[in-house]
Every structure is written in structure tokens, then in C-alpha cells.
Image (cartoon, rainbow, N blue to C red):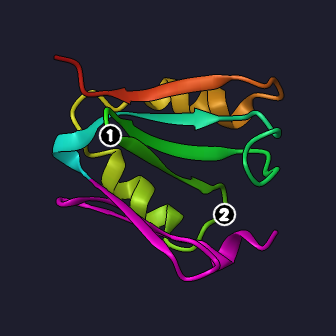
Amino acid sequence: MNEESWRVVADETGVTVTHPSGESNSLPWQKIRGLFIETDDSGPFGADVWWIAAGDEGSVSFPLGASGEKEALAYLQTLPGFDNQSLIKAMQSTDNATFVIWDKGG
């Protein structure tokens, strides 16, 4: 899989992911409950690390290395309560685990 053929944008409206097929999925912030990093390589496309924005009405995910990831991360790190320690642990993990890096709460 070519991770760079994925595209992610995170901004004040929400998170939008464009798949290599050209299909796009979006979740607005009001529907997102948390942001996660999953290091389980048995995910839907077999990638080692997946970013997931999940809510009550579904989720959007993209692999580590997706186009726009660095810009998305810079935006996500501005969210109140973004957990950089969990991010660091996720990036250093060799386990199949899920790390919560932002929880909307409430």
C-alpha cells in the first residue's frame, strides 16, 4: 500500500480523508468523540499504524505517512487536551494496541 496516495485534512471543520480510490469520508468535530492511534497491523488494509477519528456515527481513518499527515498533526496538537505523551507512546509501540490521544469528554 502506498500511504502517500491517502490524503488527510484536519481543520476547524473536522477531519476529511481521501482514499487512494478517490472516495472521501469526513466527520465534523461535533460528531467526533475521540482521536486514536492503532498499532494493530491486522487493520482493514494491513498497515502498521492507523490514525482514527471516531464518533457515534462512524469513524474516519488513515495510515501513518498519509499525505497531509504532518499538517493534520500540527492542527490536532492545538486541540485542548491533546495527549502528546500518548502520541509518543503510540509511535514507540511495537504492540498491537490502541492509544487515545484526544478524548472530547462530556
Residue name at image x 71 percent, y 69 percent: 3
Residue type, label 1:
Glu
Label 1 neighbourhood size at 10 Å, few (<14), some (14-19), many (20+)?
few
Position of 96 with respect to 78 (left or right) is right
Instruction: Tell me if residue 26 comes above or below residue 55 in the rendering.
Output: below
Residue name at image x 64 percent, y 46 percent: 50
Q: Identify the image quadrant of residue 91.
A: top right
Q: Which residue is mark 1?
A: 57
**Alpha carbon of mark 2 to alpha carbon of mark 1: how far?**
26 Å
Position of 76 with respect to 88 (left or right) is left
Which one is closest to the eye, mark 2 or mark 1? 1
Whole-percent x, y for residue 49 in the image: 71, 45
Asked which secondary structure carries label 1, the reply is: loop
Quadrant of the drawing holding the N terminus: bottom right
Label 2 neighbourhood size at 10 Å, few (<14), some (14-19), many (20+)?
some
Is 5 covered by the magenta stretch? yes
Whole-percent x, y for residue 15 in the image: 34, 58
Q: Which residues are magenta?
A: 1-27
Q: Which residue is mark 2?
A: 65
Instruction: Tell me if residue 80 comes above or below residue 45 in the rendering.
Output: above
Asked which secondary structure carries label 2, the reply is: loop
Quadrant of the drawing holding the C terminus: top left
Whole-percent x, y for residue 35 in the image: 42, 36
Q: Identify the image quadrant of residue 93.
A: top right
Is 13 covered by the magenta stretch? yes
Q: Earlier in the sequence, mark 2 or mark 1?
A: 1
Q: Residue furthest front?
A: 57
Of 89 and 6, nearer the camera is 6
Residue name at image x 18 percent, y 60 percent: 13
